[in-house]
Amino acid sequence: MKKILIVEDELNMVQGLKDNLEFEGYEVDAAMEGSSGLQKVLQGKYDLILLDVMLPEVSGFDICKAARKAGVDTPVILLTAKGEEIDKVLGLELGADDYITKPFSLRELLARIKAILRRSSNGGEGHSEPEFVSIGNIQVNFRNYLARDRDQEIKMSHKEFEVLHYLYQNAGKTIHRDDLMSSVWSIDYDITTRTVDNFILKLRQKIESDPNHPKIILTVHGVGYKLIAG
Ligand code: CA
């Protein structure tokens, strides 16, 4: 039986989650303060942690950070309130695996719990790269081809993910159009530098807040492109 720890200071929330998760067949433990939550997290005996960000004394962020520092790699789903967008990015950088914004539907939470437990029991891949990385205002999960702008999913093709990933791996460096073509498209694929430019234009429409003034994928005139991360 999978064990889930809830760290949350709102009693109604704790009770509601506990009942529903137990009904779904999970073993559930709960802590209602940051300090006791941290102690339980550090025991490392859970399969997943639902961690509220806004806790008295020790915040969810502090717990997440302390856990990762202590080598506890239990998957964490942050429970954030509306208007805490910056906190989500920070949380993911501190080592959380996912976040969900209150109020959320139980169905959505269960889906995310299942997805994370499935991934972590497949195991072996470790946590060398966080699930989601921040690029500008967006979060991208290259392993599972997911991208989000705050809570909004960004629909991108596999090729768009590949291009973005290639640029991300070379963040800060100028990438020649020819490099992009040979790395992402196969050599014999009939594309021209104009195809690459049009492709980047379309990609910007999806990921840039202002596609006319890009902040993520910059044009290096006459050469190619450069991705600015963070
Ligand atoms: Ca709270």
Image: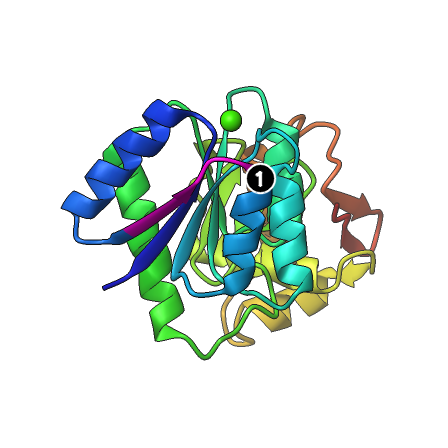
The magenta span reads 28-33
Q: Is residue 154 visible?
A: yes
The colouring scheme, among rainbow, by chain, secondary structure or one colour, is rainbow
- The secondary structure that most of the magenta stretch takes on is strand
Q: Is residue 92 above or below residue 142?
A: above
From this viewpoint, which residue is outermost toward the top? 83
Q: Secondary structure at mark 1?
A: helix
The picture places residue 59, in percent across and down from the top left corner, at 63, 36
Q: Quadrant of the C terminus?
A: top right
- Residue at coordinates 77% horizontally, 48% vertically from top-left? 228
- Relative to 118, 180 lies left or right: right
Which sits in the foreground, 6 or 215?
6
Q: Is residue 208 visible?
A: no
The residue pinned by badge 1 equals 34
The picture places residue 40, in percent across and down from the top left corner, at 50, 54
Total labels drawn? 1
- Residue at coordinates 37% horizontally, 65% vertically from top-left? 119
Which sits in the foreground, 175 or 119?
119
Which sits in the foreground, 33 or 203?
33
- Residue at coordinates 60% horizontally, 28% vertically from top-left? 85
Q: In the rendered structure, does residue 77 fall within the stretch colored magenta? A: no
- Residue at coordinates 21% horizontally, 38% vertically from top-left? 20
Q: Quadrant of the N terminus?
A: bottom left
From this viewpoint, which residue is outermost toward the bottom? 124
Amino acid at pointer 1: Gly
The picture places residue 62, in percent across and down from the top left corner, at 67, 44
The answer to which quarter of the image holds residue 27 is bottom left
The picture places residue 49, in percent across and down from the top left corner, at 44, 51
Q: Is residue 74 above or below residue 24?
A: below
Q: In the rendered structure, does residue 31 fall within the stretch colored magenta? A: yes
